[in-house]
C-alpha cells in the first residue's frame, strides 16, 4: 500500500526533468555567452602569437608559452561549459549556484577518468559531455535535494551556505554515481561503434590536394550545426586539427624562404569564409540595413555590426532569428560555400598571399587579413570583396522576406490603410528593442536593489480569526505575511509583494508561508488546539508541479489543518495544471477557497470546471450592504454558493450592522475587524479567552 508520502516521491521523480524546454535552451545559450570572455582570451593568446610572427620578433619561448597557455585553456573547456551551463540551470531550479557548478566540474573530472585522456576523439567526446551533462545532472540534483532523506539540515542556524552544502552531500554522491554509469555507457558505445575511427577520419582530410572539398565540408557542417543551435566550431573540433596542421606547414615554409603550399587552413576560413561569423552573416547585416523595410530587423542588424566585425554573430542568430528559420537556411548554408570556392581560386591564382599565421575565428576583420598574410593589402581587398559578394547573395532573401510580409497585408479602402503596416508601425513606434533591453536591465537593477533591502528585514506571520456565524466559535485563521524593518516599521503585503512578483519569487513566498503555518499548527496542537489555517497560494506555485510537491510534503505533518486561498485570475493561467494541483491538494486533505470572489476575472464557469470548497466573498460586497442594490448582489452570491453546496466565507466585516446582515445567512464564516484585526500567534490564546467570554455573555 502506498502512503501519500510515497506518492509525492513518485510524482517528483516522474515529473518532467526540466521546468520547461525553453529553460534548458536559455541555459545553454546564456551559459555559452558567459564563456565569451574566456573564448576571446584564448583567441587573443593565439593572435598575439601571430603578431610576434608578423613583426618578426624572435621570441620562441614567449610564442611557445602562448601556445601552451592556449592549449591548457582549451583542455579546460569541458569544465568551463559544465560549470557555466549548470549555474544557469541552477537559477531555474532554485539551487545554490557555486556548489552546483563545483559538483558539475567534479562530474567532468570523473567522466574524463573513465573516458581516458589520450586522443582527440576522447577530447571531443568530453567536450560533448561538458555541454550536455548539466541538462540531466542539475534537474536530478534538484529532485534528490528535495527528498526527505537528503535533508540533513532543516534550519539555517549555522548559515545558509552550510545548510545548502550539507543538503547537497547525498544528492551529489548519488548523481556522481549516475554520471559514472553514463560515462561507462558512453565509453562502451564509443568503443563498440568505433566512433574514434570515425572522428579520426576527419584528421585524414586532404587539405592540401582537395582544398575546396575540405573547406566546403567544414563550412557546410558548421552552418548545419549552428542552424539547430549547436556551436559548430566546437562540434567540429576533430576537423580543426588538420586545418591547423596545414597552417603550421605554411608558416614553416614561409619562414624557410619558400611559399605557403596550403590555400585551405584555419586562417583561410577565419579571414575569408566566416566573415561576420557562422554563415558569413556580416553580409546579411549590411543587406538588412541597406535594403530591408522592416525597422525592427534593421535595428537588430545595426546592433549586431560591432560584434560581427569580430566574427561574433549570436545576436543575429537568436535575434532575427536565423536558428530554426527555414527562410534563411539556404543563404546561411550557401554563402560560406561560395566564399570557399572564390577564396581558393583567388589564392591559387596568386592574386592574394596565402595565410601563414594563425588568425583566430574572433579576430577583427581587416586587421586579421593584413596580419595573417604578412602585410598583403590584397588580402584586405579580397575580404571586402567577399563581404560585398555576401551582401548580394543575401539580398534576394531579404527582399523575399519583405515581399512575403507585404503579401500578407490586408488593405482597408475606407480607412486607406493596411493591417500589417499599421501593426508594424505601432510596434516600431512603441517598441525599440534596444530601449526595451535597457529598460529591462534597469528594471532588473531596481528589483535587485529593492530585494537587497529585504536582507535586513524580518518576515513574520499574523493571523486573522474566522468566526462561525451560528456557533460564534473560532473555526479558522488566515495567515497574513508581514515585513518589519530594523526600526520596527511594518509593511503590509500590498507594499512589497509586487517586488517579489517582479523577481519571480512568489513561489518562495508561498512555500515560506506554508512552512511557518505548519509550524504554528503544530505549536497549537501541543497546546490542545486544532485550528485550521488558510494561506494564500499564487499562480506561479500552482503551475509548478515541483513546488506543489514541496507543499504537499509540508502539510502532511498537519493533515487537514492547512487550507489554500487562490484568486480568480489564477484559474485562467493554466487550467490543466491548476486543476491537477487542486486535485493533489484535495488528496492531501486541504480545502481550496476562491479568494476575493466577485472581483477580477470573475466567471461562474470556474465553479463548474474546478473543484472548489468555499467562496470567500470580497469585502467590497460587504461595504455595499448599506444600499438595496448591494444587498441584492450579496444575496445572489450567497444563493449561488448554497445551490452548489459550497461553503461561504465573508471577509471585511467591520461593523455591527454588517455582521447583523451577514449572520442572517445560513452557516457562514465571518472574518473582519468586527471581531479582530490580524494578531500575532502568541496573542491568540488571550483573544480566544476574551472572545469566548463575550460570546457566553451574549447568550
Image (spheres, grey):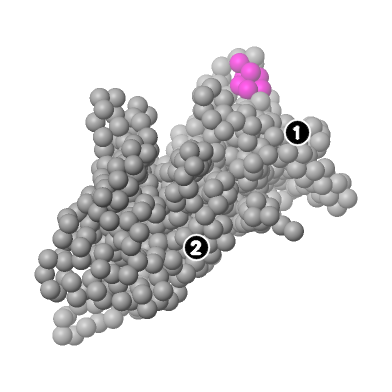
Compared with residue 320, is residue 108 higher up or lower down, i.e. above or below? above
Dominant secondary structure (helix, strand or loop) of the stretch shown in magenta:
helix
Q: Nearer the viewer, residue 171 or 617?
A: 617
Q: Nearer the viewer, residue 640 or 212?
A: 640
Q: Nearer the viewer, residue 155 or 600?
A: 155
Spatial separation of the CA atoms under disc 2 and disc 1: 43 Å
* Location of the N terminus (image quadrant): bottom right
Helix, strand or loop under label 2: helix
Residue with the most extreme bottom position = 414
Residue located at (25% from left, 54% from top): 698
The x, y position of residue 93, in whole percent, is: 54, 45
Local packing at callout 1 (Cα closer than 10 Å; few below 14, some 14-19, many 20+) is some
Residue located at (27% from left, 56% from top): 699
Residue span colored magenta = 62-69
Left or right placement of residue 487 versus residue 68 in this view:
left
Q: Nearer the viewer, residue 210 or 39?
A: 39
Residue located at (69% from left, 34% from top): 170
Helix, strand or loop under label 1: helix
Local packing at callout 2 (Cα closer than 10 Å; few below 14, some 14-19, many 20+) is many
The x, y position of residue 633, in whole percent, is: 21, 73
Residue located at (16% from left, 66% from top): 625
- The residue beneath circle 2 is 582
- The residue beneath circle 1 is 110
Residue mark closest to the camera, 2 vs 1: 2
Amino acid at each position: 500500500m502506498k502512503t501519500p508520502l510515497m506518492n509525492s516521491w513518485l510524482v517528483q521523480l516522474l515529473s518532467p526533468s526540466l521546468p520547461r524546454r525553453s529553460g534548458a535552451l536559455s541555459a545553454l545559450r546564456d551559459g555559452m555567452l558567459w564563456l565569451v570572455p574566456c573564448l576571446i582570451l584564448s583567441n587573443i593568446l593565439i593572435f598575439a602569437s601571430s603578431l610576434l610572427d608578423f613583426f618578426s620578433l624572435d621570441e620562441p619561448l614567449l610564442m611557445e608559452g602562448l601556445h601552451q597557455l592556449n592549449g591548457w585553456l582549451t583542455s579546460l573547456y569541458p569544465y568551463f561549459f559544465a560549470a557555466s551551463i549548470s549555474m544557469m540551470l541552477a537559477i531555474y531550479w532554485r539551487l545554490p549556484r557555486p556548489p552546483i557548478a563545483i559538483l558539475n566540474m567534479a562530474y567532468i573530472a570523473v567522466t574524463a577518468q573513465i573516458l581516458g585522456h589520450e586522443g582527440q576523439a576522447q577530447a571531443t567526446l568530453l567536450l560533448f559531455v561538458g555541454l550536455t551533462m548539466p541538462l540531466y545532472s542539475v534537474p536530478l540534483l534538484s529532485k534528490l535535494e528535495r527528498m526527505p532523506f537528503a535533508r540533513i539540515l532543516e534550519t539555517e542556524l549555522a548559515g545558509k551556505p552550510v545548510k545548502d552544502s550539507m543538503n547537497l552531500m547525498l544528492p551529489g554522491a548519488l548523481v556522481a554515481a549516475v554520471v559514472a554509469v553514463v560515462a561507462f555507457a558512453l565509453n562502451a558505445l564509443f568503443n563498440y561503434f568505433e566512433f574514434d575511427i570515425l572522428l579520426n577520419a576527419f584528421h585524414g582530410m586532404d587539405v592540401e590536394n582537395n582544398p575546396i572539398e575540405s573547406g566546403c565540408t567544414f563550412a557546410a557542417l558548421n552552418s548545419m550545426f549552428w542552424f539547430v543551435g549547436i556551436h559548430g566550431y566546437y562540434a567540429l573540433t576533430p576537423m580543426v586539427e588538420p586545418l591547423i596542421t596545414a597552417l603550421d606547414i605554411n608558416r614553416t615554409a614561409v619562414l624557410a624562404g619558400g611559399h605557403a603550399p596550403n590555400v585551405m587552413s584555419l586562417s583561410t576560413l577565419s579571414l575569408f569564409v566566416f566573415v561576420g561569423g557562422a554563415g558569413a552573416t556580416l553580409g546579411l547585416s549590411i543587406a538588412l540595413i541597406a535594403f530591408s523595410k522592416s525597422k525592427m530587423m534593421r535595428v537588430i542588424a545595426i546592433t549586431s555590426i560591432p560584434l560581427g566585425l569580430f566574427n561574433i554573430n549570436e545576436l543575429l542568430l537568436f535575434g532575427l532569428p536565423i536558428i530554426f528559420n527555414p527562410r534563411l537556411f539556404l543563404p546561411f548554408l550557401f554563402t560560406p560555400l561560395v566564399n570557399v570556392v572564390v577564396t581558393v581560386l583567388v589564392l591559387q591564382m596568386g592574386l592574394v598571399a596565402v595565410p601563414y599565421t594563425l588568425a583566430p575565428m574572433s579576430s577583427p576583420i581587416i586587421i586579421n587579413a593584413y596580419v595573417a598574410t604578412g602585410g598583403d593589402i590584397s588580402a584586405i581587398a579580397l575580404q571586402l570583396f567577399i563581404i560585398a559578394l555576401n551582401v548580394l547573395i543575401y539580398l534576394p532573401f531579404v527582399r523575399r522576406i519583405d515581399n512575403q510580409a507585404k503579401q500578407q497585408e490586408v488593405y482597408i479602402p475606407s480607412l486607406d490603410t493596411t493591417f500589417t503596416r499599421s501593426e508594424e508601425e505601432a510596434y516600431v513606434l512603441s517598441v525599440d528593442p534596444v530601449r526595451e533591453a535597457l529598460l529591462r536591465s534597469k528594471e532588473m537593477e531596481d528589483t535587485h536593489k529593492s530585494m537587497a533591502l529585504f536582507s535586513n528585514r524580518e518576515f513574520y506571520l499574523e493571523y486573522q480569526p474566522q468566526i462561525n456565524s451560528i456557533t460564534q466559535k473560532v473555526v479558522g485563521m488566515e495567515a497574513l505575511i508581514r515585513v518589519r524593518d530594523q526600526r520596527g516599521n511594518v509593511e503590509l503585503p500590498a507594499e512589497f509583494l509586487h517586488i517579489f512578483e517582479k523577481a519571480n519569487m512568489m513561489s518562495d513566498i508561498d512555500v515560506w508561508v506554508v512552512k511557518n503555518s505548519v509550524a504554528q499548527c503544530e505549536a497549537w496542537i501541543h497546546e490542545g488546539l486544532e485550528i485550521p489555517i488558510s494561506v494564500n497560494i499564487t499562480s506561479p506555485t500552482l503551475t509548478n508541479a515541483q513546488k506543489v510537491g514541496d507543499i504537499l510534503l509540508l502539510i502532511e505533518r498537519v493533515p487537514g489543518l492547512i487550507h489554500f486561498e487562490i484568486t480568480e485570475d489564477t484559474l485562467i493561467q493554466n487550467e490543466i495544471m491548476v486543476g491537477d494541483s487542486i486535485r493533489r491538494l484535495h488528496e492531501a486533505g486541504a480545502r481550496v477557497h476562491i479568494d476575493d470572489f466577485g472581483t477580477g476575472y470573475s466567471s461562474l464557469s470556474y465553479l463548474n470546471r474546478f473543484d472548489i470548497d468555499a467562496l470567500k466573498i470580497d469585502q467590497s460586497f460587504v461595504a455595499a450592504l448599506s444600499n438595496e442594490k448591494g444587498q441584492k448582489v450579496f444575496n445572489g452570491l450567497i444563493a449561488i454558493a448554497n445551490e452548489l453546496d459550497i461553503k461561504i466565507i465573508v471577509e471585511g466585516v467591520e461593523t455591527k450592522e454588517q455582521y447583523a446582515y451577514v449572520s442572517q445567512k445560513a452557516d457562514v464564516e465571518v472574518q473582519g475587524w468586527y471581531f479582530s484585526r490580524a494578531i500575532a500567534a502568541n496573542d491568540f490564546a488571550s483573544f480566544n479567552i476574551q472572545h469566548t467570554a463575550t460570546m457566553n455573555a451574549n447568550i
